[in-house]
Image: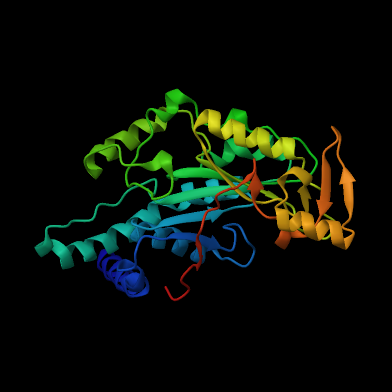
Amino acid sequence: MKYFEKTWYQGIAKTFLDTIEPFLTARKTIFKVEPDFDHETLSDHLRDNILITIALLPKHMFLVSTGNPSFMLSFVNERAARIKTIVDAVHKTIGQQETRNGRQPTPQWPLPNLFVGTSVHSQDQANQCMETLLRIPARGHYAIVEIDKESLDLWGYLKTPEADSQRCGWPPIEGMAGYRSTHADEAACISCRENLAAAQPSLDFIVVAGTTDAAAGPVDPSVVKLLAEQCRDSETEFFFSGWGEWVPENECSQRQIELIETSGTESCVLRGGQLMFRVGARKSGRFLGGKTTDVIRCIGFTAPTTV
């Protein structure tokens, strides 16, 4: 039986090496794994493949979303031993190939390049799922906030200065200020990462977006600004991907204003007197505070199905 298991894992290792080979030489990339981790079209086998593939490509960053954090937490904890065994077998194979170069890969858990997130639509939903999300073993966690008129406060799930001072910065991630390298080498950060287990988990970044469906209501700009201020005060990365169907009058570009004046665009007034125009999600833009805000630029990634 032991011989069978050894040869089986060796076969798995070779297959995975063939699968990931194109990514080994690619430049550092942020991948958005599709579909959601708990999606009904994914089998447990494919979910294993997702985590194993991420483990084998440490120089790339992977964003994995889940609509059910409880399911993902349970799955990752239950399958961790099997995943680590396969990853270790692949790393040994890679190590045998690269010993002459002096490089010996070391399996790491939690995965240092995995960020896990979930979509948040309301305060009640955030209160129900956020603590579970933050318990999923990963490099970091994020929230995709899709809002319309409802107020939303995530301050309780953002990092404190005390926790941030302990944050591991290896490997550095380009474009994210909170993940600059703070150590001379990876070994120093491995011990640093182990110390984070006792730290209060928190969101590493937030992506805010207005809803884009036909029945979407206008986003209250005060909610967006509140989240932006909370991220700024906690030094959490904040990304804004657009206003959705409606855009505030004071966040319109000059071209949008000209189109609104000549096209008879639908409008409404929110509480507090904020005038909103319905211009469509493709035209509403990413103006916030008079300037275009950042978005995470990533590439869609589908789990390998051949293993």
The location of residue 218, given as percent across then percent down, is 81, 47
Q: Residue 192 lies in what quarter of the image? A: top left
Nearer-the-camera pick, 8 or 266: 266
What residue sits 21% from the left and 40% below the top? 184
User: Is residue 204 shown to the viewer in this render?
Assistant: yes
The location of residue 100, given as percent across then percent down, is 9, 64
In this figure, which colouring scheme has been used for the structure? rainbow
Q: Residue furthest top?
A: 162
The location of residue 140, given as percent across then percent down, is 46, 43
Position above or below: 246 against 227: below
Q: Residue 104 lies in what quarter of the image? A: bottom left
Position above or below: 299 against 174: below
Which quarter of the rendering shows the N terminus?
bottom left
Taking 143 as reference, is 181 left or right?
left
Position above or below: 22 against 282: below
Count of numbered circles in the view: 0
Taking 201 as reference, is 182 left or right?
left
Taking 281 as reference, is 2 left or right?
left
What residue sits 12% from the left and 58% below the top? 102
Nearer-the-camera pick, 301 or 212: 212
Taking 105 as reference, is 304 left or right?
right
The location of residue 96, given as percent across then percent down, is 16, 65
Nearer-the-camera pick, 96 or 287: 287
User: Is residue 123 shown to the viewer in this render?
Assistant: no
Position above or below: 86 against 142: below
Which quarter of the rendering shows the C terminus?
bottom left
